[in-house]
Amino acid sequence: MDHVLLPYIAPLKPGRPFARRFVLEEIRGVYCVELHFRDRVDARRFAVRLVPHESGQGAFASTGLVDLSLKLTGPPSRDIDLLALSVGKLLSRNMHGLTAQDVRALFSEPAIVDINGTSQERRIDFFVGYRCPAQCRFCTDRKDNDEPPHLSLAELSQRFADAAAQGFTSATLTGLEPTLRPDLPELIRAARHSGFTDVQVVSNGVRLHEPAYMERLLEAGMTVLILSVHAADALTESQLTGVPWLFERKLAALKNAHTLFGSRQIQERRGLFFRTNSVLTVPGLAGLPQLVDLLTEHESYLIPLHFPWIQGRAAAHFASVVPRYPDVKEALGPLAPLLQDPEHPVSVLNLPPCVIEETDIPALRVKTQVSAESDPDAPETAGCARERKMDETLVYPPLCAACSARTRCPGVSSLYLEHYGTAGLAPLS
């Protein structure tokens, strides 16, 4: 049975990132609540302990109603301190209006809430189609030749059921543009019917300019909408996608999502999330602050900025797509205050920590997806996640051998080294 405190600590859900780099693994306690976290970057584990205010046990911070203390398995760090403060802010916001008596009642039962069995959200990708009007220069999924046939609703429904039976709980519908399938709402319903508690849809906005269509996806059971937006102006976006009319549709999709999903706080309470996906590119670096402002204005719950995976079209258009690390670092400089604020949704992925460590911007490691396929060489037409890194060319150059951050570094593309050498790399001691 759920602990009565749980609605007040949303979005601290098992497996869902919070404050960019932390994942809630377990909730337990007797006349108190301990939130057990894992740091996705260095895998450290620790707990934030919650007790009623004035209980005499608060050792870190107080929200006025609830006291927080930290229980660490290693030395303290600024990142963990920021997380605890973020939890405090979350509690203050969600408990607004409660009385001290109300809060004491939340801790009155000697309940132990053990959610460890579901703490690892297992996510799997389903490739539901290979059509897309865009010609994105950085696309890793583009199939120019020998496009496989579309899987039918019945075939995908069976694959949903098979994956759910293997313990997968989160499904992502992708490849290339899912909204081009007329039966996408039915696919979402089939995934939810199979047992997936989380169904995400990745889109570049082709049909999301239609408010009624976005509503249909939500009504069908979509829990997360991920919109790809790579620039704040039409010219740069069309340079990257090759489709001049698409940018206006993305702007309309942002407005529709803002209306239907609401603010980040409302998204947290409803458990329905709108987030974006942006790739760091040569033409896009100059307008990066404007892009983050645009996405923040429309209440994107997460704003990840990805350094491109250098394969497929990104490899073919390397010089016009892949930026040098020093240029990325310079472009991220104005965003440092936002990146250091655990309450802000922007984050950086797929960059070596040494590239941005000197500016104190926390780098997040992108993890390889787990596949439901027993055969690692199974074709992508299986409709399941790919069992490989999105960039198969990642290596650790010799100068990285002694770097202290190697365990949390995604590596460097051999194609990057071939074109740019080790520019921007400086091993950390």
Image (spheres, rainbow, N blue to C red):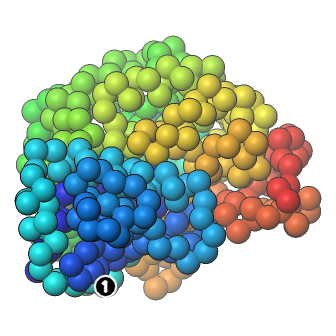
Q: Which residue is painted at 76% across and 42% down in the image?
A: 358
**Viewer-side residue, 103 vs 314:** 103
Q: Quadrant of residue 194?
A: bottom left
Examine the rendering and report whether any part of residue 395 can be seen: yes
Secondary structure of the residue carrying tag 1 is helix
- Left/right of residue 150 with respect to residue 135 in the rendered view: left
Q: Quadrant of residue 150?
A: bottom left
Q: Which residue is painted at 59% across and 64% down in the image?
A: 76
Q: Position of residue 159 (x, y in %)?
A: 27, 74
Task: Judge the density around disc 1: few (<14), some (14-19), many (≥20) Cα neighbours within 10 Å.
Answer: few
**Viewer-side residue, 238 vs 142:** 238
- Left/right of residue 51 with respect to residue 147 in the rendered view: left
Q: Mark 1: which amino acid? A: Gly
Residue behind mark 1 = 117
27 lies above or below 176? below
Examine the rendering and report whether any part of residue 243 can be seen: no
Quadrant containing the N terminus in the rendered view: bottom left
- Left/right of residue 102 with respect to residue 39 in the rendered view: left
Q: Which residue is painted at 34% across and 42% down in the image?
A: 301
Quadrant containing the C terminus in the rendered view: bottom right
Q: Position of residue 54 (x, y in %)?
A: 26, 62
